[in-house]
Image: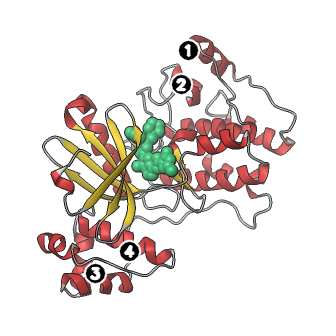
Amino acid sequence: MVRYAALKGLYDLEKTIGSGGFAKVKLATHIATGEKVAIKIMDKISLGDDLPRVKLEVQALKTLLHQHICRLYQVIETDGHYFMVIEYCSGGELFDHIVEKNRLSETESRKFFRQIVSAVAYLHSLGYAHRDLKPENVLLDREENLKLIDFGLCAKPKNGIDSHLQTSCGSPTYAAPELILGKKYLGSEVDIWSMGVLLYALLCGFLPFDDNSIENLYRKILSGKYAEPSWLSTSSKRLIRAMLQIDPKKRITIQELCNHPWITAGFLNPVSFVHKTNFEKDDDVLSTMSAICGEHASDIWRKLVKSDRTDYRTATYLLLLDRKLRGLSLRISSSAKSHFKSEC
Ligand SMILES: Cn1cc(Br)cc1C(=O)Nc1[nH]nc2c1CN(C(=O)N[C@H](CN1CCCC1)c1ccccc1)C21CC1
């Protein structure tokens, strides 16, 4: 097991749960609380000119607080590496869940899709676009709730979500026609298209546009033609058509999506989200921490709010908050004392 000095005493690294181009993700234990976390380890040298993407992802994840977006707890930077300590989802990828079940029922698809729509509506309301929505970037937690990950490509255009983007990015299979044509596009509109592909994958168990050759794939996407299997209900066919509109101006908007009949069927209300960008003050968690840190809860809270929210103290607060929200006891090991001392 490779030892990283920067994690010593803070996190115990366990197995690797994912490895991509310039990063790998390892399961770890947050020592102070015993909670499982996922640590995304990026080697600065192999990152090369992709370094700005890390800053962009960190900035986005620090801002985004939503129950269906994977939470960032702590960021540790050393000369050679970035460590992003992120919420651990023990249910694996949505992609594997669909493959395992062949395809999902309309009811199960609707439960999952409402969670994705809520996360994306929240994202767009804060001026962000994900731009790489696909089943591999949607994870399941232990309660089978969805969590959005991989914000390395997300964009927050300086003059708001309604200003055009140009960089082509994301995976072509889920990419909107305007994006693969290299046209100027709106992040919000390409996210709607990708969610249409995602919904199709949930309901059908395969992709609307797929081909081994890239130019055939592009041709299929640009044609906007895809199979509508017999098991699709009229309402789901209507919704998918509204999302997979070639002309972005004809595509359903995120607001219309939240209220669409297919989305609200069987539910009392449209999809909504809480516009949260600051975590709430919790006195039980603060008093648990002050017992160890020997500081007043009010001082700990003041430092938490004032800090850049990516230190061990923040990680401990958020992980204790998660434990409380799950109805578990608030425990913290005295070994944390020394690490708080350094930050106190
Ligand atoms: C697959 N799996 C199975 C189990 Br059980 C748990 C998991 C799992 O990945 N859990 C998990 N929890 N939290 C995370 C993960 C994975 N993970 C990820 O961020 N995983 C992504 C996966 N991307 C999908 C397409 C390209 C890469 C990743 C990014 C860079 C390098 C490796 C992996 C986080 C940190 C946010």
* Residue pointed to by mark 2: 172
Image quadrant where one finds the C terminus: bottom left
Marks 4 and 2, how far apart in space? 40 Å
Circles 4 and 2: CB atoms closer than 8 Å? no
User: Is residue 252 in sight in this rendering?
Assistant: no
The secondary structure type at the circle numbered 4 is helix
Circles 3 and 1: CB atoms closer than 8 Å? no
> Looking at the image, is mark 4 or mark 2 nearer the viewer?
4
State which quadrant residue 17 falls in.
Answer: top left
Circles 2 and 1: CB atoms closer than 8 Å? yes
Tag 2 or tag 3, which sits nearer the N-term? Answer: 2
* Residue pointed to by mark 1: 214
Q: Within the displayed image, which quadrant is ligand 1 positioned in?
A: top left
Where is residue 330? Give x, y as percent.
39, 81
Query: At label 1, which amino acid type do we have?
Result: Ile
* Residue pointed to by mark 4: 320
> Looking at the image, is mark 4 or mark 1 nearer the viewer?
4
The secondary structure type at the circle numbered 3 is helix
Q: Is residue 203 above or below residue 70?
A: above
* Residue pointed to by mark 3: 289
Query: At label 4, which amino acid type do we have?
Result: Leu
Query: At label 2, which amino acid type do we have?
Result: Pro
Where is residue 210? Give x, y as percent.
64, 22
The secondary structure type at the circle numbered 2 is helix
Tell which of 20 and 9 is nearer to you: 9
Tell which of 301 and 140 is nearer to you: 140
